[in-house]
Amino acid sequence: MYTPEGRVKASVKKLLDQHKVYYFMPATGGYGRSGVPDFVGCARGKFFAIETKAGRGQLTALQLREINRITESGGLAFVIYQDNIKDLETLFQ
């Protein structure tokens, strides 16, 4: 049984797998860097990161910091909810 955010993650995984995109899901578990997005990968030569949220979930300050660092470095960063998953299609164009 998935949590609401787990369902969003499952939808993202399915889409990335369908398009054969390289990605991984960093496991911080207290040992990694806090705020790292849920998915990190490369599509069409472009680094991307995806943070998933359910409902009206908001980014934490640490997540926002990481997303800003990614975009300032030229990467793509997405915040994906159940209703905007189609935004990921820009990765495959």
Image: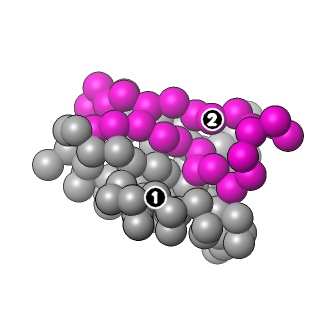
Element type at marker 2? loop
Residue type at tag 2: Pro
In-image side of 10 versus 2 (left or right)? left
Magenta span dominant secondary structure: loop
In magenta stretch: residue 20: yes
Q: Which amino acid does the dot numbered 1 rest on?
A: Ile
Is residue 68 toward the left or the right of residue 85 in the image?
right
Callout 1: few (<14), some (14-19), or many (20+) C-alpha neighbours within 10 Å? some
Q: Quadrant of residue 72?
A: bottom left
Give residue 67's position: percent from left, percent from top: 52, 63
Residue at image coords 59%, 45%: 38
- The image shows a total of numbered marks equal to 2
Q: Position of residue 65 (x, y in %)?
A: 61, 67
Residue beneath disc 1: 70
| Image height of 76 relative to 6, above or below | below
Which element type, helix, strand or loop, lies under badge 1?
helix
Query: Residue at the spot x=69%, y=55% of the render?
Result: 35
Is any atom of residue 31 visible in this view? Answer: yes
Q: Which residues are magenta?
A: 19-43
**Which image quadrant: the N terminus?**
top right
Q: Which mark is residue 26?
A: 2
The percent position of residue 79, horizontal first and vertical second, equals 50, 62
Position of residue 24 relative to residue 11, above or below, is above
Q: Are marks 2 and 1 in contact (CB under 8 Å)?
A: no
Q: Answer yes or no: is residue 81 visible.
A: no
